[in-house]
Image (cartoon, helix red, strand yellow):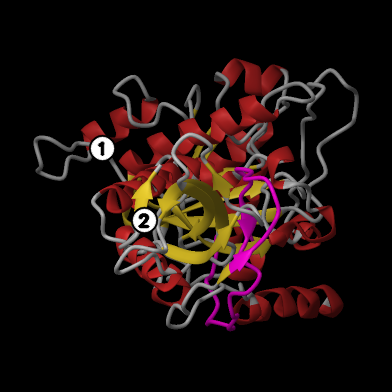
Amino acid sequence: GEAPRRRMARVVASVSRVVCRPRVSSAPSRPRVVVVARACVDQPREDDDAPRHRPKPLATAATPLALDASLTRSILLVGDGDLSFSLALARRAPNARITATTFEPRETIVSDWGGDESIRELRALPNVEDVLHSVDATRLHTRASPLHEIGANQRTGNANDDRKRWDRVLFMFPHIAGKGKISKNRDLLCGFFRSVGAVLAPFGVVEVGLVAGQGGTPADGVHRRDFGNTWMVSEQAAKGDFVLCATEPFDYEAWRECEYTPTGHWRGLTSGARSFVARDGVVHAFARPGEMPATHARCPHPVTHRRAFSIWIDEESTPGFREPELERTVKRAVSPGVHVASLTRMEPNDWTCPSTGRTSRTYVVELTSTTTPWDGRRATEEQFRVREALATGRVPGAELR
């Protein structure tokens, strides 16, 4: 009727209003040295002081608000349980070129997931290039993957590179079976990001949809948990050299109108009619550094890692120790793209060695990045760069402890 048509028109017209808010720092301000009494904890946290701006929207294929006949990208979906999401997406983007895949073999998809009808409908759509099974999202880069056969049939002329590549790769609501498997789900995402680059086209975008609270970013809203109690999606992406460039709310109601119904539960398919809760989910978009969309060239939710170092100080020498010189040395020591958010003294009182009489002081440097893959390992690498700079005597009156 006329009312449903008007409602769907509103859905399509809303694409230009899907907005992500990256946090973009202006010229880096000089870090302040303050005295604090606290322990040094390796706990990433968001840089709440970074200014915000509202960029032009980044249309993501993970919400029907961004899909219409103008979408002509090639899209690969991995890990789709019953293929209902792939089918809904194919219907909403008739000009996109879609390849749908499942982790389980076809027999399991039909018998356990009830995906037989979805398979038939997908194969009948002209914009669906292929429906493949037994595709491991963490093994996309291997010759054992069924995707490799597609590449072998569509060689680009490069003898060293016969893989087909897609403009978008979607992994919607992944989950390892069982409750309390946070570490295993982190490993799943890590394996996916380390593999997906092999099948992603230049300047392509990877999208991961997660249940509210799993991702570990402020985009989780009221469902946000302590960072250590999440899948740390941005850190897993960094291990595959990807940077978070946008987050979008998963529009469950709009997808339901497209006949998508979440299927499956952490308890397994034998838990009756129960399914995971897609409502309030979040879609995370990632790109390679240097290939991030111009309107989303910085991570919207950067995390900050804290690292400590100790120095022997001599304020009586000529010239003596000065904290402004320490600040400058730390800022010059870190890699391009890494920002020194703050430099603080960890203890209110210095410690004096009883045998030598020398004074020791401990500092904590908070490091973050909005343009490079960023995780705890890279923060530790930057800590060693700072220590190397201090070990060379670049700060008068200071010696690395």
Which image quadrant: the N terminus? bottom right
Residue 270 in view in this figure: yes
Q: Residue at x 42, y 68 (%)?
A: 327
Q: Residue at x 78, y 53 (%)?
A: 224
Q: Secondary structure at mark 2?
A: strand
Cα separation between marks 2 and 1: 54 Å
Q: Is residue 67 above or below residue 87?
A: below
Q: Residue at x 88, y 21 (%)?
A: 271
Mark 2 lies on residue: 398
Q: Main secondary structure of the magenta part?
A: loop
Disc ID at residue 230 = none
Q: Is residue 140 above or below residue 238?
A: above
Q: Secondary structure at mark 1?
A: loop
Mark 1 lies on residue: 163
Comparing 176 with 72, the one in front is 176
Q: Residue at x 41, y 47 (%)?
A: 383
**36 falls in the magenta region:** yes
Boundaries of the magenta span: 34-63
The local crowd at label 1, few if under 14, some if 14 to 19, many if 20 or more residues have their Cα within 10 Å, is many
Which amino acid, by three-letter code, is at mark 1?
Answer: Arg
Q: Is residue 193 above or below residue 37?
A: above
Report the side of 315 relative to 224 (left or right).
left
Which amino acid, by three-letter code, is at mark 2?
Answer: Ala
**123 falls in the magenta region:** no
Q: Position of residue 353 (x, y in %)?
A: 51, 39
Q: Position of residue 279 (x, y in %)?
A: 82, 53
Q: Position of residue 324 (x, y in %)?
A: 42, 73
